Amino acid sequence: MNREQWGFAVESHGHGDFARARRGVITTPHGAINTPAFIPVGTKATVKALSVEQVRAGGAQAVLANAYHLYLQPGSHILDLAGGLSSFMNWSGPTFTDSGGFQVLSLGVGFKKTLAMDPGEVTADDVIQAPKLRLAHVDDDGVTFKSHLDGSLHRFTPEVSMQVQHQIGADIIFAFDECTTLMNTKDYQQIALDRTLAWAHRCIAEHQRLTAERVGKPYQALFGVIQGAQYEDLRKTAARTISELDFDGFGIGGAIDKSALTQIVSWVTDELPEDKPRHLLGIGEPDDLFRGIESGADTFDCVAPTRNARTSAVYGPSGRFNLTVSENRTAFAPIDENCTCYTCTHYTKAYLHHLFKSKEILGSTLTTIHNVHFTVKLVDRIREHLDQDNYEEFRDDFLARYYPSR
């Protein structure tokens, strides 16, 4: 499959207050992705606790793996020898890899829990470790970092990120960028944008070189990443400059103040071309998915559904709840009586409560099956209601039930 056979087609748009929302289809060497779509995260070539058969049964159209983690273990060259990510993990559908930039900087520089937080609640010192404690150091050429696994020293440049992602072989890959937090000053955000733009040029050049060199390999679509934190002028400038380059699509990334997600994503999508897909990185909570779609994003990924599942937190029609609370000890009903996932059609909350209390591994598998199915199907339903022209009614009803206290 060459570049001309890869593509994205917008099939329809929303209207009124959600006119930016759109339906489309991304075509990849491993199949099509109907958008909007939620992409489960399989960081190390596995969606934690699930087999690929269980991921497929949950309705996922694609999975996203992590270049940083796969570079460190087992090594991107191993995936190349295996025939690429899809062959290695036995996943027959489309695949994404992020560039490793988030992990290199978040694990290395010491961002604590998230890059998306209320800037009024914490200080820079709360979020970013002192230089002597950092595992990563950024310069204009790239990032030198220590492995979080064994402390060994490594260096990522735009060229290395492209080389690693070409070896991994995902259908959609991302340019190497510098992640920042909401705590960084605006002056530093500008420096990071300038650096990310320079790196974007280098990523494209190396991507083109590798595409020409690796004859016979399926074409990998390269997405540019748009940063800018909570600043309208920076976000719009980044979107304009990145969209002028020869990218196949775009990732909307970096620090996002969740309370302003709609506004921030809209600033970006208003500057982007209509005929290329937009991926909103690291977004997966139900209300954020609605807001992202209404703002013009096409695909999403997030570890929240799987990470929450492993702590016994599951999604139900009336919101997220914890299975280990005492009331579930004798709750002989499924997580959601209307859910068609394998867990809800075979097991009760009482049994799942028992599994977590007794620290049985099966508990994480069954809850992950449900949470992945719930999130994937939520976006599928949004897509269907956009087609049926009754999206607003569905959104208002879902959110009123899921967040009853709002």
Image (cartoon, grey):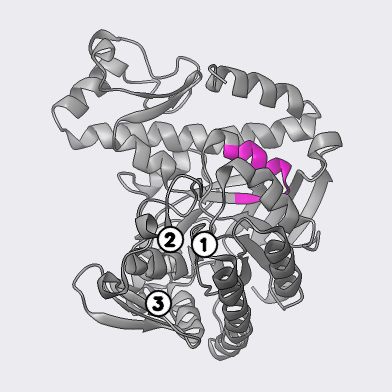
Instruction: Using a 10 Å C-alpha cutoff, classify the residue at mark 3 as few (fewer than 14 neighbours), some (14 to 19) or many (20 or more).
Output: some
Give the mark, 2 or 1, whose residue is nearer the N terminus: 2
Query: Three-letter amino acid code at disc 3?
Result: Asp
Relative to 91, 107 lies left or right: left
- Marks 3 and 1 sit apart, C-alpha to C-alpha, by 15 Å
Query: Three-letter amino acid code at disc 1?
Result: Phe
Query: Three-letter amino acid code at disc 2?
Result: Ala
Q: Which residue is mark 3?
A: 80
The magenta span reads: 288-299
- Marks 2 and 1 sit apart, C-alpha to C-alpha, by 6 Å
- Per the rendering, the mark at residue 264 is none
Can you tell which of label 3 and label 2 is closer to the viewer? 2
Q: Is residue 202 above or below residue 2?
A: below
Instruction: Using a 10 Å C-alpha cutoff, classify the residue at mark 1 as few (fewer than 14 neighbours), some (14 to 19) or many (20 or more).
Output: many
Q: In which quadrant of the rendered image does the N terminus lie? A: bottom right
Relative to 38, 138 lies left or right: left
Disc 2 + disc 1, Cβ < 8 Å: yes
Q: Which residue is mark 2?
A: 65
